[in-house]
Amino acid sequence: MVKENTLKLTQSIWDYTSSDTSSHTSFINLGKYLVMIDTGMNAESTKKLREFAELTTNLKFKYVIITHYHGDHTFGTKVFEDCDIISTQWTKALLTKKVENEYKDKEIILPNKTFTGEYQIKDGSRILKIIETNGHTKGSAFVYLPDEGAIITGDLLFAKMFPFAGDSTVNPYKWIDGLQKMIDLKPNIVIPGHGLISSISELKEQQELLIELVKVIEEMIDQRMSIQEIKKSKRFPKYPFDVNERWLNMTIENFYKVIKEKKEEI
């Protein structure tokens, strides 16, 4: 199934979509070696994807980039013991806590290279940029390939889907800003964390969704509505796709907390 679920998007970018979690795992041919972006939840599938990638390109993996710490992007790290694993400092810190608790039965390899802000990988004239935004989680980052005009968003984009905002470190304001950073790059190809291969329009759609959600919650907080009243409110917009009720409630709770804290600081 790995070969069937893998698309060649450009001369140097391939993307695999997991059939069980719908999460994306991409690999890049940088010329002399390969780079993997996220590692999926199923290590066995990731092992097969690695074998397929190295056989197809006749190159070996040198780097693995983790966009954020969630299990559907990190459980496959065990397949890359021989590679440098790169993430933001916050992603490593959060993943380390998970490995000590909920993920303790998983064979996860922690990042050995970390950064804040931006990190670059160069191979001759080719360049790959990892840009930290926070938002979906603290430490979330996206990957940008200037030559292809391609962005790999991690879970900063759920294309044509209601985004998962249930993480305790979520920040809607930074998420909106992160989407703007990607929009400003005017990408030709956008590979989301979940959903179909996209374009700049999906980035704008999700940004608008988040902006509207924040606006509605801000207004209700200003009207001194409680979190229980807000969750029962009919003022939230209707979406052109199914919305997981549990995800929506988690989103409201987490956004409420961040928005209320921000208002109290003013």
Image (tube, rainbow, N blue to C red):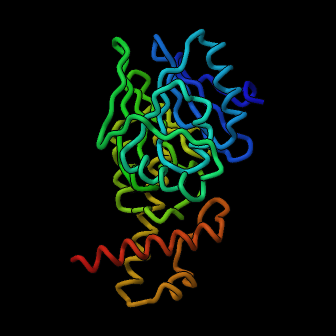
The reply to whether residue 196 is in sight is: no
x then y, percent, for residue 143 = 43, 35
Q: Residue at x 51, y 23 (%)?
A: 28
Depicted 63 relative to depicted 126: above or below: below
State the quadrant of the C terminus.
bottom left
| Among the 4 quarters of the image, the one containing residue 224 | bottom left
- How many discs appear? 0
Say left or right for 34 vs 177. right
x then y, percent, for residue 153 = 48, 42
Q: Residue at x 62, y 45 (%)?
A: 195
Front in this rendered view, residue 184 or 164: 164
Residue projecting furthest to the right: 1
Q: Residue at x 58, y 69 (%)?
A: 248
Residue projecting furthest to the left: 266
Depicted 6 relative to depicted 251: above or below: above
Say left or right for 132 vs 190. left
The reply to whether residue 76 is in sight is: yes
Q: Residue at x 48, y 39 (%)?
A: 66
Say left or right for 161 vs 28. right
Front in this rendered view, residue 230 or 107: 107
x then y, percent, for residue 160 = 59, 51
State the quadrant of the N terminus.
top right
Depicted 266 relative to depicted 179: above or below: below
Front in this rendered view, residue 153 or 109: 109
x then y, percent, for residue 229 = 52, 88
| Among the 4 quarters of the image, the one containing residue 10 | top right
